[in-house]
Every structure is written in structure tokens, then in C-alpha cells.
Amino acid sequence: MPRSLGADEPAVQYSDVSYSYPDGTSALDGITLTLPKHALIGVIGPNGAGKSSLAKLTINLFDKYRGSIKLLGRELRQYTTQQIADTVSFITQNPKEMFITGIVREEAELLPKTRGSSNPRKKALEALHKAGLDDLANSSVDTLSGGQSRMLTLASTVFVSDSKIIILDEPEYGIDLGIQETLLNYISQLRAEGKTVIILTHNLDMTLLCDYIVLMAEGKIIKMGHPSEIYEDQAMLQRYSLDQPQLYSIFREAWKHHSYIKNIDVLLHYLLAALQSSPDDGYES
């Protein structure tokens, strides 16, 4: 069921945050936003809305911002680079931008090695197994499909670390619907484990499992609410060139014909729960 915003402590808190690129172009303008712990949050908006800039500020890639950003109650400027890396996992839109060593197993070993793991190979192989990449451990990353590359980014970051906050930038980029389903299942598991997961996307199909959705445009927060609050405001979605999730539209039509269901969030919750409990057929690469 949708979580209560007031009941959760902040994972990330932005207070009047603004940022401009070196050429003076405004990227973020007066962002005030609270993202609760242990929640799955979709940050949506058209290209150029400021989603990626907000994420990069959150991991301190841009340090000349105005305002305040707090991670888990502590001012971001008080964190060291290593402490931020230990707290937040950021997965970029293009998976291959993240690869360093060139070999699948070595990519998954890299983070455990830098963190001083006593057995980085074992940890890496466990992560690759979880990601369904066992048979490709000794392969070059250049041979991976888009879906396999995306799963390797999870195996080499989230699956081998204890990050409390996970940010995925356009995770649907370059993958098919089967991989999207697998990815959403993993994201849901991470939320169930108590992680805060933030998805940056302009594809609202990726937000169906979210507790909250934040709409951004032109570097500003337009609205934050539960999924149905965002999905039902079709005029707002159209204004920013966004579409209702296809599955939600189907559920919405079903809800119209079942008047005894008083809350569409309830219907969405139970239908998605039913879909998640169906047998996992795996995925094709």
C-alpha cells in the first residue's frame, strides 16, 4: 500500500537548492523536496527537466550549488567522497560508461576489492549469479547486450555494496520489456530490504511500483504525490509530454466497472501484487 510521507524519516532532503552550469544556464531553481527512507520514488519529467542534475548534486558531482542537501539527516558538504560512495549507489543511463576493467567478473570484483573484502571473487560471483550472468563471468563487457549490461551495473554496484540510497538514471534505456520486468522485480526487492530507491525517468511505466512520484520541469518541482495523484492529472501529464502508464490505463478502465472498490490505489496495489507473485519465467537477452 502507499506509504505515509509523514511517517518516514528523510533519506534525502533538499532545501531551496539551485544550480547553474558554468556557462550560467540554470539547471535547478529553488528545489525544496523531502524523499523518505525505505521508499521507491520515481522522479519524472521531460528531457532537460533537471532530473540528472538533481541526482548528480546528490552524489556531490557538482559542488557549487546554493541551498542545503542532507543525506540521512547529515549535510552533504560534511561527507567525504568515500562516505558518499558508501551511502549512495548511482547507476548512469548508459551502463557502459560505468565499466572500467573490460571483463564481466572483474567489473563485479572491483568494488569489493576497493572496500577491502576478504574474498572479492566470491562476492562478485554471487552478485553475477543474482544478476543471471554466471555464464558470462569471463566475457568482455563489449559482448554484452543492453539488458546484460544493465544487469552488470547492478551486480557491480548494488549487489556488492550496502548502499542505503540507490539512484537509477533512465534504467529502461536500451533494454526490452522482459528486462524491464526483471529490473522492476529487483528494484522492488531492494525497497523491501529497506533501501531508498530513486528512479529518474520520462517513461511512467517504470513508476508503477513507486510509493511516490515527483514531477520536474525546467529545473523545478511541479508536483509530488502518490502514483494515482500524478497519473490522474492527465492535463498536467500532457503539458509536459508524458503519458499515463499503459497498465494503469487498463486498471483505470477496470476500476470504472467495479464501483465497490473505492480507491484506485488499492486496486493498483493488489493487481501489481498478483502480477509479482506469478511465476518468474526469466528473461531473454
Image: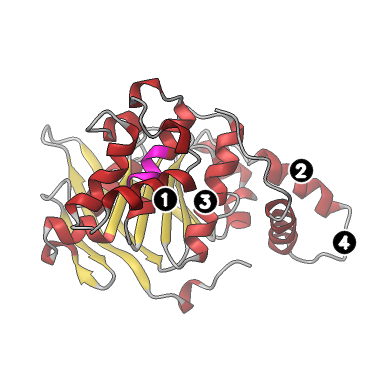
Mark 3 lies on residue: 186
Labels 4 and 3: the sequence-earlier one: 3
How dense is the environment of label 2, judged by Cα within 10 Å: few (below 14), some, or many (20 and up)? few
Q: Residue at x 39, y 21 (%)?
A: 143
Name the amino acid type tagged 2.
Answer: Ile
The quarter of the picture where residue 106 lies is: top left
Name the amino acid type tagged 1.
Answer: Glu
Mark number displayed over residue 97: none
Nearest the eye: 170 or 117: 117
The N terminus lies in quadrant: bottom right
Name the amino acid type tagged 3.
Answer: Tyr
Mark 4 lies on residue: 259
| 4 and 1 marks in contact (CB < 8 Å) | no
Labels 2 and 4: the sequence-earlier one: 2
- Helix, strand or loop under label 3: helix
Labels 2 and 1: the sequence-earlier one: 1
> Percent from the top left, x then y, of residue 195?
42, 63
The label nearer to you, 2 versus 4, is 2
In the picture shown, does residue 16 fall above or below 59? below
The label nearer to you, 1 versus 3, is 1
Q: How far, Cα to Cα, is label 2 from label 4?
A: 15 Å
Mark 1 lies on residue: 126
The label nearer to you, 4 versus 1, is 1
Q: Residue at x 72, y 43 (%)?
A: 249
Task: Describe residue 60's horizontal placement relative to residue 99 as left or right.
Answer: left
Name the amino acid type tagged 4.
Answer: Ser
| 2 and 4 marks in contact (CB < 8 Å) | no
Residue furthest top as drawn: 143
How dense is the environment of label 3, judged by Cα within 10 Å: few (below 14), some, or many (20 and up)? some
Looking at the rendering, the stretch of residues picked out in magenta corresponds to: 152-157
Mark 2 lies on residue: 250
> Percent from the top left, x then y, of residue 152?
39, 38
